Amino acid sequence: MAVMKLYGSPLSSAVWRVLASLYEKGLDFEFIPVDMKSGEHKKEPYLSLNPFGQVPAFVDGDLKLFESRAITQYISHEYADKGTPLVVPGKPMAIVSVWMEVEAHQYDPLAGKLAWELGYKPHFGMQPDHAVVEENEGKLGKVLDVYEARLSQSKYIGGDTFTLADLHHLPTLSFLMDTPAKKLIESRPKVSAWVADITSRPAWCKVVEFRKQH
Amino acid sequence: MAQKLRLHGIPMSSCAARSMICLHEKGVEFELVLVDFFVAVEHKQPPFLSKNPFGQIPVLEDGNLTLFESRAINEYVSNKFKDQGTDLIRHDSLEESALVKVWAEVESHQFHPAIYPIFYQHLLAPLYGKSSNQAIIDEHLEKLRMVLDVYEDRLGQTKYLAGDFYSLADLHHMPMMFYFMKTPWGHVVNERPRVKAWWEDISSRDAFKKVAGGMTIGDK
């Protein structure tokens, strides 16, 4: 049985999202680097794995997948009996699903822009756009106010246990904690405690280690 | 004894439509509970905020379960009622259900961010008394063209996005596609023959027709 393959760049937050799920489940996989500097992701044969020319891509036997959140969901369901349960049975899964959509549609568009301005741009020697930073910090603050109220009623964002709803936030959260935008998290006690909890998980620490080694 | 599902929203809302199409595809009876959207701005205040703290529609109530985010509502409805109506999630096939997830994520992360600003600028901004920003429209038309080029290619391999079967992945596109075809830039779709054929096919489905009549944004 062929080992699962994860294609991508060690710099990509979407790749970290998939890595987190693989480490949480203790699954064997092969990481295949994609040379984004030379544009490998925008050409064949990579495009036959991800026609949008983005990372990651994922192969499990005959199944070829892309979009990090589709890959994590596949891993969570197909390997439900291995490692950490990242999805839950019954009605509680509907609530997890709600907060997975919140991550995708309320949180990520804002946090992703901030991660780009404050994290990636300096790395590539570019200047952040302060108007964009200010606008998105304001909007993200309002979203995190909702999270603060949610985390006063629920231990994790999707319910009582750590699930994909929390995991999907990890890449941009950990990025933001290394930038001045961390003040948005630190000023909200429940959010702050939740971030501290989920970023200290052994599987996430393995992702951080992976980034450092590559 | 099953209570009827209650969906809070308004017929013209693209997000409420996304869930209503799904409910019709599954043949699930529901009550549309109208929200006083434009005058009282009911969705931005208590008690509505206790149903959706982000102050948006739709909200689904199924007994004591309250859900928001239209795509999460659709996932729940498609799972709960998997043995009736259209099979939107292909639950019997690991491979098909994984591909439905892939192309549903594509709708969320590639298609929606490209098309929504065009819809907002051309159709919604005037409703809110604001002027429309052509530069934003042009920027996003470019992005949408690139996304639809991938779809054109994909639809040369499969009849629908996730495979040779209609699924949630196609369904999630429908509200934005419908409103986009009311803008002056519908030719972006029509210039791509497979995308055009796909749209004509899915928009002829009965479940969609039941909802489209209420989607009146942009009508004179």
Image (cartoon, coloured by chain):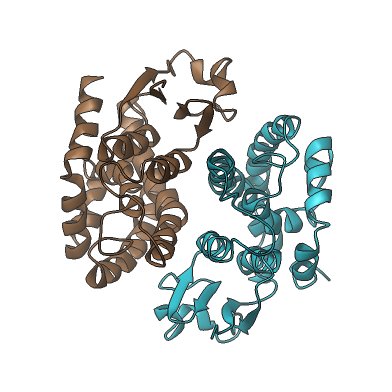
Chain colours: A brown, B cyan
Q: Residue at x 57, y 40 (%)?
A: B99
Q: Where residue B98 appears, x then y in whole percent? A: 53, 41
On the rendered structure, is B162 left or right of A179?
Answer: right
Q: Quadrant of the C terminus of chain B?
A: bottom right
Left or right: where A150 falls relative to B99: left
Q: Position of residue A197 (x, y in %)?
A: 16, 52
Nearest to the observer: residue A82 or residue A66: A82
The image quarter containing residue A194 is bottom left
Q: Nearer the viewer, residue A169 or A69?
A: A69
Quadrant for residue B82, please give it.
bottom right
How many marks do you count on the picture? Answer: 0
Residue A86 vs residue B17, the one in the foreground: A86
What x and y, as percent, mark residue B211?
A: 74, 69
Give the residue at x 50% y 78%.
B61
Placement of A31 over or under B159, stated as above or below: above
Q: Is residue B216 visible?
A: no
Q: Residue at x 64, y 81 (%)?
A: B32
Q: Quadrant of the N terminus of chain B?
A: bottom right
Determine the image quadrant of residue B110: top right
User: Which x, y percent locates residue B194?
Assistant: 80, 37
